[in-house]
């Protein structure tokens, strides 16, 4: 399911502090998975940090999201800068859906003129990518192969049988 988070950047926070908030969001979310530790997510974010700080400082994450995919989590993370940052609300809480994650990937945007720097950072860790992120999973009967509502159970609950 597609989710989004907007993180406040300059002038409220420096690029480094903003990257730390994004790192904590990703690490806290992956920490609920039984397959990964917080440290694994932190290691990926550390490898991406030089490029991430540049993306934030240049305002690129205001327009091009970092996409975090882990299990049912598909979250676009953007920043807000300038005057808008002074009054913006942010939600740094854990993104629901990662408890059953068996893999995770952080898709970094690579706008010009930072494409080379971002690609080098992504090459530094297996959980980072500059590829286009996959489309978010739709939680429908077509996607899961099962109906969203168990009509037999609903009928039984209503009729008492």
Image (cartoon, rainbow, N blue to C red):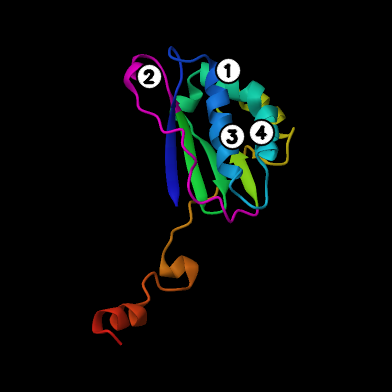
Q: Quadrant of the C terminus?
A: bottom left
Question: Closer to us: mark 2 or mark 4?
Answer: 4
Residue 158 left/right relative to 7: left
Q: Looking at the image, do the residues carrying marks 1 and 2 touch, with CB atoms under 8 Å apart?
A: no
Q: Looking at the image, do the residues carrying marks 3 and 1 touch, with CB atoms under 8 Å apart?
A: no
Identify the mark nearer the N-term, 1 or 2: 1
Quadrant in which residue 147 is drawn: bottom left
Q: Looking at the image, do the residues carrying marks 2 and 4 touch, with CB atoms under 8 Å apart?
A: no
- In magenta segment, residue 33: no
Q: Residues within 10 Å of mark 3 (few under 14, many from 20)?
A: many
Question: Closer to us: mark 4 or mark 3?
Answer: 4
Identify the mark nearer the N-term, 2 or 4: 4
Q: Position of residue 106 (x, y in %)?
A: 60, 39
Q: Nearer the viewer, residue 157 or 33?
A: 157
Q: Position of residue 95 (x, y in %)?
A: 48, 43
Residue highlighted by disc 4: 42
The magenta segment: 79-102
Q: Secondary structure at mark 1?
A: helix
Residue highlighted by disc 1: 16
Q: How many numbered marks appear? A: 4
Q: Position of residue 118 (x, y in %)?
A: 64, 28
The residues bearing labels 1 and 2 have C-alpha atoms spaced at a distance of 16 Å
The residues bearing labels 3 and 1 have C-alpha atoms spaced at a distance of 16 Å
Identify the mark nearer the N-term, 1 or 4: 1
Question: Closer to us: mark 3 or mark 2?
Answer: 2
Residue highlighted by disc 2: 85
Relative to residue 101, is residue 129 depicted above or below?
Answer: above
């Amino acid at each position: 399911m597609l989710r989004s988070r907007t993180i406040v950047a300059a002038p409220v926070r420096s690029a480094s502090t903003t990257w730390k908030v994004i790192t904590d969001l990703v690490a806290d979310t992956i920490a609920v998975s039984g397959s990964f530790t917080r440290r694994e997510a932190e290691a990926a974010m550390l490898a991406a940090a030089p490029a991430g700080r540049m993306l934030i400082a240049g305002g690129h994450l205001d327009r091009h999201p970092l996409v975090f995919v882990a299990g049912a989590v598909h979250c676009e993370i953007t920043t807000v800068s300038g005057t808008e940052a002074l009054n913006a609300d942010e939600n740094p809480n854990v993104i629901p859906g990662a408890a059953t994650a068996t893999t995770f990937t952080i898709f970094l945007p690579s706008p010009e003129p930072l494409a080379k720097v971002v690609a080098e950072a992504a090459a530094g860790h297996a959980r980072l990518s500059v590829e286009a992120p996959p489309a978010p999973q739709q939680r429908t009967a077509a996607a899961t192969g099962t109906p969203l509502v168990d009509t037999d159970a609903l009928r039984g609950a209503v009729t008492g049988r």
